[in-house]
Amino acid sequence: MPAADTRFLTFKDELHRAVVDVADLSRLDTWDRPRLRREVEGLARRLAPQVDRDIPAADRERAVEEVVDEVFGLGPLEPLLADKKVTEILVNAPDQVYVEVGGRLRQTRTRFVDKAHLTRVIQRIASRVGRRVDESSPMVDARLPDGSRVNAVLPPLTLDSPVLSIRRFGEAFTPDAMLANSTLTPEILNFLAAAVAAKTNILISGGTGAGKTTLLNVLSQYIPRSERLVTIEDAAELKLRQPHVVRMETRSANLEGEGQVTQRDLLRNALRMRPDRIILGEARGPEAVDMLQAMNTGHEGSLTTVHANDARDALSRLELMIGLAGVDLPAGVTRGYIASAFSLIVHVSRLAGGARRVTRVAELRGLKGDKYRVRDIFRFEQTGVVDGDAVGSFRATGYAPTKLLDRLAAAGKGVDGRLFDDRPLLEILPTAGDNGFPDDVAPDIELTREVEGE
């Protein structure tokens, strides 16, 4: 670490201790926090020359701001949390803090004083949501009041340092925003919108960070406002705009191992709540059985996501989940159950350069023997990588899902058959610049380098 950085961190640490020793912080939980913050900021400025009179003025001012953030917020993380363009914050060690903006991952100059400092911030985050994290309970997975998802792990489970991950969720994406980002094309969106409105059961698949939940949020906007919806999630991320929505979230067991409420528990209860549709944030385990049962017994138009590498892998994952539920059925019966539940599979991928694309929209046409009959309707064909960005084109395959189209027409949501003519829909060319990064980042976030391979 450069000597200047060492001096700054030492100064900030000593200033923080001086402020805590002098200030009356017993009022932190009172309603007048803005006034108290101003008082502490003034105190820090008065104490700074006593700690180190010769430190540069710019460093002194920066230290004052960070000390106040430390007292009232989450210390070094505050500037990152203040920038709405930052979608992920990843802390691997006190001096290894990364952010994701515009799909690209970069290391920042943000740092904690030491491992104890990082641990204190993690514990402060956990305490805000009524959770505890320490040596006896070294993992925490929680949701902050703003909807951000937090995961933290302490030693001895992590060998080198406490680690922290914060995934942030801003304003819900709109269909126009997805079109502007070329996540999909107008043709694909029009078809999916009609399918959702006509109560088609849809499975959205994709890898970590591919945008499954974002797409689910967007498609849910096409559900009629008159319907009663029940959402079930491990960590609440969905932001449905309909007026008649019941949101449910799982609960972890307490320290005595009691009180756990799983997605399966919530799903079974949801069936008694007269839902028009059930939306399961992500199928991960035995709850898949109950979701499939709901879809096969009249709860049409239900939606869920699954973590998978491609559309066919998503079906295999569902089979595995049925097995985890202890349901012992022949493979053909299990596959028939899945094939009768879903009509469409939409796969979304995070490509080179960070772009998210709907790479496949396919109809699940049932079984042929004991094999799934899956036909692509639309797909994104990647042709290469230029300057780190994936290039290629969306195209219609020429396959028209006639049975599904009849369903859409019967529901008054018919689409033009020419939509499916075999042709390219949109070509994705190399983009100029660096995908809006780092110019899009707030000026108080200092970056060092882009992570290789992104």
Image: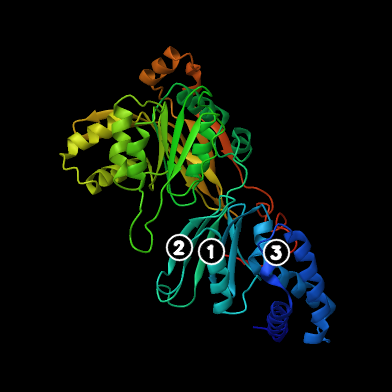
Q: Tell me the number on the disc at residue 127.
A: 1
The earlier-in-sequence mark between 1 and 2 is 1
Residue at 49% in and 46% down = 236
In the image, what residue type sits under mark 3?
Ile
Asked whether the beta carbons under mark 3 and mark 2 sit within 8 Å of each other, the answer is: no
Per the rendering, the mark at residue 277 is: none
Q: How is the image coloured?
A: rainbow
Give the mark toward the camera: 1 or 3: 1
Q: Dot 3 corresponds to which residue? A: 445
Q: Is residue 34 above or below residue 17?
A: above
- Disc 2 marks which amino acid? Val
The CA distance from mark 1 to mark 2 is 11 Å
| Foreground pick, 136 / 408 | 136
Residue at 49% in and 43% down: 213
Residue at the spot of label 2: 140
Q: How many marks?
A: 3
Please state the horizontal and vertical placement of residue 184, each as a whole percent of the image: 54, 36
In the rendered image, residue 219, in percent from the top left (x then y), is placed at 51, 32
SS state under label 3: loop
For residue 369, above or below residue 407: below
Left or right of 208 on screen, residue 36: right
Visible residue check, residue 169:
yes
